[in-house]
Amino acid sequence: MANTTSGTILASGSLHSAVSQEALRNFMARNFFMQFGKEYQKPRGMTSVTVYTPKDMSTAISTLTEGQTPAETLFTLTPTVITTSQFGGRVEITDVADHDSPLIDTIKEVSYEMGGRLAQEVDQAYQDTVDAGTNVIYSTTEDASVGRTNVDDGDIISLNYITEAASRLSGLNARPYD
């Protein structure tokens, strides 16, 4: 009967550190949509966190005229509740598989693969959030209410659409990314 190595050996120490580093190395290399998010620290023991998005204040700034009080702008915060999700897995490696694979560092290989798989899951969660957004730009010929579900071979992106999108994003003070 083959023995299995339990995940509890990774609770602490240098093996835990090596596995974590290998998994994170592959995890970070495979994320794409994660770059569009903003990181928030969840309070300990909480399953959700409320973040507040400030109103766009670009119209609050204008040229001042001596002796005139500038127009007042109301500052508002919009609350968004973020519920956390956990991702993880458990892998069992038999002593036979570990012993019969002298050319492969089994634990390192499993850590690398698990990091890659975790990256796919987390990045998919980010993509689902991005896709659920309602502030979307479609071509002028597309009906915005069915834009994502009605894409066909006639919907061709052009430089004009890209320029229009870039201009709108710039007007909203969106940060550029590579």
Image (spheres, rainbow, N blue to C red):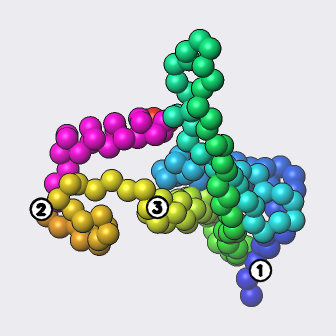
Q: Earlier in the sequence, mark 3 or mark 1?
A: 1
The Cα–Cα distance between marks 1 and 2, rounded to whole angstroms, is 59 Å
Q: Residues within 10 Å of mark 2 (few under 14, many from 20)?
A: few
Q: Is residue 169 magenta?
A: yes
* Circles 3 and 1: CB atoms closer than 8 Å: no
- The Cα atoms of the two marked residues, 2 and 3, are separated by 23 Å
Q: How many marks?
A: 3
Mark 2 lies on a secondary structure that is loop
For the magenta stretch, what is the residue range?
154-174
Q: Position of residue 145 (x, y in %)?
A: 32, 69
Question: What residue is disc 2 on?
Answer: 154
* Residue ID at (46%, 66%): 132
User: Few, some or many C-alpha atoms within 10 Å of disc 3 (few <14, some 14-19, many ≥20)?
Assistant: few
Please identify the residue farthest to the left as the structure is shown. 154
In front here: 93 or 83? 83
Residue 133, numbered circle: 3
Please indicate whether residue 131 sits to the left or right of residue 83 in the image: left
Given contact means CB atoms under 8 Å apart, are the residues at marks 1 and 2 in contact? no
Quadrant containing the N terminus is bottom right
Chain-order first, disc 2 or disc 3: 3
Residue drawn 13% across the image and 64% down it: 153
Q: Residue at x 60, y 19 (%)?
A: 68
**177 or 141: nearer the viewer:** 141
Question: What's the distance in space between the residues labelled 3 and 1, CA to CA?
Answer: 49 Å
State the SS at label 3: loop
The residue pinned by badge 1 equals: 3
The answer to whether 28 is drawn above or below residue 105 in the figure is above
Quadrant of the snapshot with the C terminus = top left
Residue 177 in percent (x, y) is at: 46, 36
User: In terms of secondary structure, where does tag 1 sit?
Assistant: loop
Residue 3 visible (yes or no): yes
